[in-house]
Structure formats: C-alpha cells, structure tokens
Image: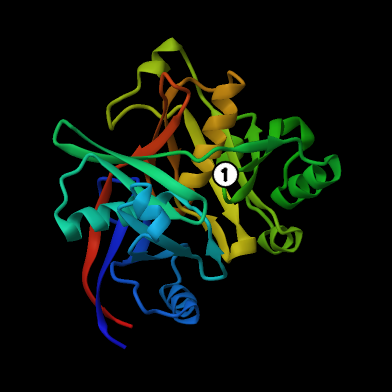
Amino acid sequence: MQNRPFQQVDVFTTTPYLGNPVAVVLDGSGISDAAMAGLARWTNLSETTFVLPPTDAGRAAGADYRLRIFTPGMELPFAGHPTLGSCHAWLAHTGSQQSRIVQECGVGLVQVARTQEAGLQRLAFAAPPCQRSEPAPALLAHIAAALGLHSTQIRAAQLLDNGPVWLGLLLDSAQTVLALTPDHARLQNLGVKVGVCSTSIASEATNLIADVDAEPALTVRAFAAPIGVNEDPVTGSVNASLAQWLIAEGLAPERYVAAQGECLGRAGRVYVERDASGQVWVGGASVTCVSGMLNL
C-alpha cells in the first residue's frame, strides 16, 4: 500500500454537494483490479476512477491519460460525470492549462473541451457514438410496470448504447418524471438501466440557453439498479445518449440545459450542444470537495 493523490469532485454544479460526486485516484499505477473494485465498493459512490498513463497506442493517438471507471458493482467502459470529474482533478493536479484533453478509456479515446465563460470553467466531453434500436414491446411493458407508468405517459422509447446501455424514455411531463417511485428490485431483476426525461420547450428562445441560471429544457432521472445504483444524481452518459436521440428526432433543440437530481436533493445542470459537424457535447461545471492522500 502507498499514499496516492486523491480528490472527490462534485460534477454538474458550481455549488459543492449539489451535483454528482466522483472519487478520483490520481495515481492508479500498480493497483490490482480487485483493489480497484474494493475501493469502489468502499466509497459507495456511483463511480470511483483511477488515472493511469495511456497505453502505447493511446499515447500515439494523443491521449493525455487513461481512465478506469468502477461502480460499486462493476467496471464501466465509459461514463460521463466520471470523465468530467476526473479531467477536472487531473487538470488541477497537473496544473495543465490546455483547452483540449484526450482521455483513453474502455470505449477508446474521448475528447474533452475546456472553456472559460464569465469566470466559470466548464468541461464538456464529446459524446461517443450512440447505437439506437427499438425496445421489445414486452421489455417496455415490464419496465413501465416497474416504474409505475401507464403506456399513455410514454411518448417515445429507445434502447441507447454509447458504452453503457440505457433504455431511454421520453415521458409526457416533468411532473410525471419527478413523481416516479420505481421498484428498484424489479429493475435490477430485469437487468436494464433506465433514463427518463421530459421536455419543456416553451419557445424557440430555448435554443439560446447559455447562462447558468437558464430554465432547463429537459428534466432527467436515471435509474441504474443493475450496477448497484438505484438512482444516479446527475448522469453524463444518459444525458449524452438522450441528447443524440432527441436532437436527431427533432424532439429537443440543438442547444439546451437539462436538470437532474431534484428528487435526491441535488440541483445538477447539464449543458448540451450539437456542433456544426453533428458532434454532441455534454458538459457542465465541477468543484473539488475533498483533496488529499489515499492509502491504497
């Protein structure tokens, strides 16, 4: 065991303890898979990450570091808020001022952009490609029952795969989203992670949302009992795949803010934008809550 630099970062918030925390071990070299998984269970956060040197292939392709991402129950090939929180921690630890960062992880290379606006730093990741398909009617019926939904409350549904696989549900109202009381044991038995959302687009002015106090265009919740997290406070991967789906289908504008976490006492704000090339970027602010050394 040795002392290793460590940070706990709150993501998708400018106010500590109102976003989604991630534990970041900034020197993951020499730690066994079992020890990584054990620490993830011990922190009991939705994700714990380990920063490592890039592989030779990753370095040759421009990677700045490699990231391994663990939930309390498994390792993930990619996750959004751990990507942003780990990049925030890496930048603070190294003192780097670069505006583009390349992370190597299970899905390959992920681009992260760093911007400064009105004194506020935001990081955004380039959403990995998303594969979409129609869910089987029987699966959709089982999920609806586990969530306590009537079929008339579901406007649209898609299976979304950008590394993690989510069943995306577009519901009829924010009130429906916020009132959900899922049967998490049933969702765990079904083995499906579910991202639910509703849109509240009142006018074309929604396309111009840019400031931190803007009214969100989407209300989002994420239920992930199959990986040991009943409800994730604020979720980058599900917001990315929902954005890729909804924007492509004309169900959301190309630039908007999503709100997530209200039912858990959080106030996450996720900034989404599809650029001129069609790339979807998902980001927000982050703040360091814990900084020190970890004995591992």
Q: Is residue 70 above or below residue 78?
A: below
Q: Residue at x 52, y 70 (%)?
A: 72
Is residue 195 rendered to the left or right of residue 43?
Answer: right
Q: Secondary structure at mark 1?
A: loop
Residue 136 place in picture, x, y as percent:
82, 41
Question: In this orientation, does residue 261 appear?
Answer: no
Q: Is residue 172 left or right of residue 42?
A: right
Give the camera-side residue of 121 and 50: 50
Relative height, residue 88 to residue 74 (above, below) = above
Question: Which residue is located at x 66 percent, y 60 percent?
Answer: 184
Q: Amino acid under label 1? A: Asn
Q: What colouring style does the render use?
A: rainbow
| Residue 173 locus on image (x, y percent) | 59, 30
Determine the residue positioned at 33% across, 27% down: 214
Up/down of 199 relative to 55, above or below: above
Up-down: is 110 above or below 66?
A: above
258 relative position to 156: left or right: left
Q: Quadrant of the N terminus?
A: bottom left
Q: Quadrant of residue 86?
A: bottom left
Relative placement, left or right, of 285 versus 80 is left
Which residue is the extreme one toward the top?
A: 204
Locate residue 39: give its quadrant.
bottom left
Disc 1: CA contacts within 10 A as few (<14), some (14-19) or many (>=20): many
Please give the residue where the numbered disc 1 appears in the rendered image: 162
Q: Position of residue 21 (x, y in %)?
A: 36, 59
| Residue at (54, 56) in percent of width and height | 231
> Looking at the picture, how far across and down is residue 222, in whole percent?
56, 49
The reply to whether residue 233 is in sight is yes
Give the number of callouts: 1
- Place residue 207 in its image quadrant: top left
In this orientation, which residue lies closer to the viewer: 34 or 61? 61
